[in-house]
Image (tube, rainbow, N blue to C red):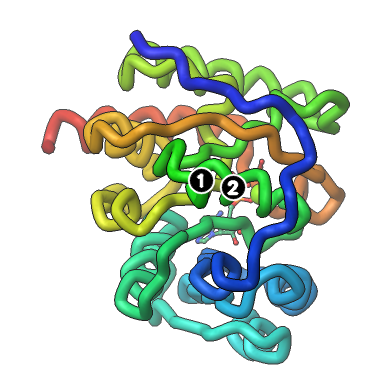
Amino acid sequence: MSDAPRLAPTAAPALSETVKARIFIVIAAYNEAACIAEVVRDALTAVPNVVVVDDGSADDTTNQARAGGATVLTHLVNRGQGAALQTGITYALQHGAEYVVTFDADGQHDINDLPALIAPIARGEVDICLGSRFLVAGSNVPTMRRIVLGAAVLFTRLTSQIKLTDAHNGYRALSRRAAQRIDLQLDRMAHASEIIDQVRASGLPYCEVPVRIRYTDYSMKKGQKSSAALRVAFDYLVGKVLR
Ligand SMILES: Nc1nc2c(ncn2[C@@H]2O[C@H](COP(=O)(O)OP(=O)(O)OP(=O)(O)O)[C@@H](O)[C@H]2O)c(=O)[nH]1
Ligand SMILES: [Mg+2]
């Protein structure tokens, strides 16, 4: 079993304008009208290319994401975060992305962590940086989420043979060649485990990078129920058998 290398939580130097211009931030959004415009505006302070995939939302997510300045792609029906990310990754590659970053729509991630996620790839050390909320001291992860995410870490060790500290963090950066090897087939939340398998199968070097996370009343109300973890494990195992 391989241990993912971990980077120390040091402040990364600012990214060059050339690198920034080649980053595409992909945000899968489902019913996030309340916060998506602000999330996009924040992301656009760091990079020029922000793509929101509105995953069949019933609210005003598309208009709000456009108002924030994003390029918006739309799923006509709700297909799940995995499908929405794959749509965004494919679009980013078609539009010349050298780096693809996945980022949540609900305001939980911090755009200030972007340089730390991109720098190891830009330096040519790795192709994939996986965000870890558990490498940051003082993350306000609620106890139940800690337990569920701890179980996900153990599950990943068993099924993917990779030791991570945070197996289901939506904040990741991929080089172009890594993004080309990602092909998410699991449409819903189980894609988070599937992507780890594909990272491993790609044979490309990867590491974990400390990233902050914010749990807010909004994110807790909208986010995953603990019981959803069973569905994720089931979908993933069925997907593995069918592959
Ligand atoms: N729940 C859900 N989220 C989706 C879907 N499609 C896209 N998303 C987006 O996926 C992101 C993550 O969803 P969350 O439900 O917050 O999951 P999470 O962040 O892994 O879990 P929490 O720690 O509970 O917040 C959000 O930005 C959603 O808007 C979908 O079909 N269902
Ligand atoms: Mg969330």
Q: Is residue 57 visible?
A: no
Residue located 61% across and 43% down the image: 224
Q: Amino acid at mark 2?
A: Ala
Q: Considering the image in quadrants, where does the N terminus appear?
A: top left
**Residue 139 image position (x, y, % from top left):** 82, 31
Residue located 72% across and 51% down the image: 109
* Label 2 vs label 1, nearer the camera: 1
Q: 135 or 117: nearer the eye?
A: 117
Is residue 68 rendered to the left or right of residue 124?
Answer: right
Q: Is residue 153 visible?
A: yes
Q: Considering the image in quadrants, where does the C terminus appear?
A: top left
Residue located 40% across and 43% down the image: 127
Are discs 2 and 1 less than 8 Å apart at CB? yes
Return the residue at label 1.
123
Is residue 85 rendered to the left or right of residue 151?
Answer: left
Above-or-below relation of 198 to 165: below
Return the residue at label 2.
119
Above-or-below relation of 144 to 28: above
Query: Residue 76 occupies which quadrant of the picture?
Result: bottom left
Q: Amino acid at mark 1?
A: Arg
Under tag 1, what secondary structure? Answer: loop
